[in-house]
Amino acid sequence: PLNLTGATITARLLDLATSTARAATGTMEVIDAPAGLFSWVYSAADVTTAGAFNVQFTATYGASSDKTLVELWEVEAAI
C-alpha cells in the first residue's frame, strides 16, 4: 500500500456520461497513514447526480511528487 504519512487527500469526479469533471467537496481523512487507508465522507454535492464516475484521488506530499489513484464509482438514483 501507499504510505500516506504527511499526505493531503483530494478527489475529482469525472462524469462518464457527460465527460464533465469537478472537484469532490466531501471530507477526505487519512485513517491509517502507513497502511494507506483514508475515508471519504461524501457531501450532498458529491452524490447529487446519479450515474457512473471515475474518481481520481490525489495524495499530495508537499515537495514530493503527487500520487494518484482512479476508481470507478456509481451513484444510484434515489427511490
Image (spheres, helix red, strand yellow):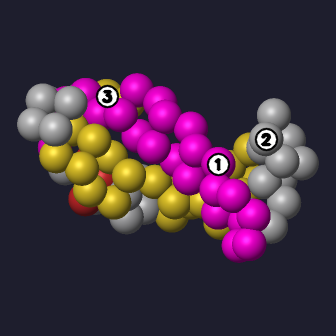
Q: Examine the structure image and report whether residue 54 is included in the region drawn in magenta.
A: yes
Residue drawn at (78%, 54%) of the image: 4
Q: Residues within 10 Å of mark 2 (few under 14, many from 20)?
A: few
Residue drawn at (74%, 44%) of the image: 37
Q: Position of residue 41 (x, y in %)?
A: 49, 55
Judged left or right of residue 34, residue 63 is: left
Q: Residues within 10 Å of mark 3 (few under 14, many from 20)?
A: some
Residue 32 seen anywhere in this rendered image of the structure: no
Span colored in magenta: 49-72
Task: Please tell me in which quadrant of the rendered image residue 24 appears.
Answer: bottom left
Task: Please tell me in which quadrant of the rendered image residue 63 appears.
Answer: bottom right
User: Under tag 3, what secondary structure?
Assistant: strand
Task: Please tell me in which quadrant of the rendered image residue 60 appears.
Answer: bottom right
Q: Is residue 2 above or below residue 45?
A: above
- Residue behind mark 1: 67
- In the displayed image of the protein, which residue is found farthest to the bottom? 62
Residue 56 seen anywhere in this rendered image of the structure: yes
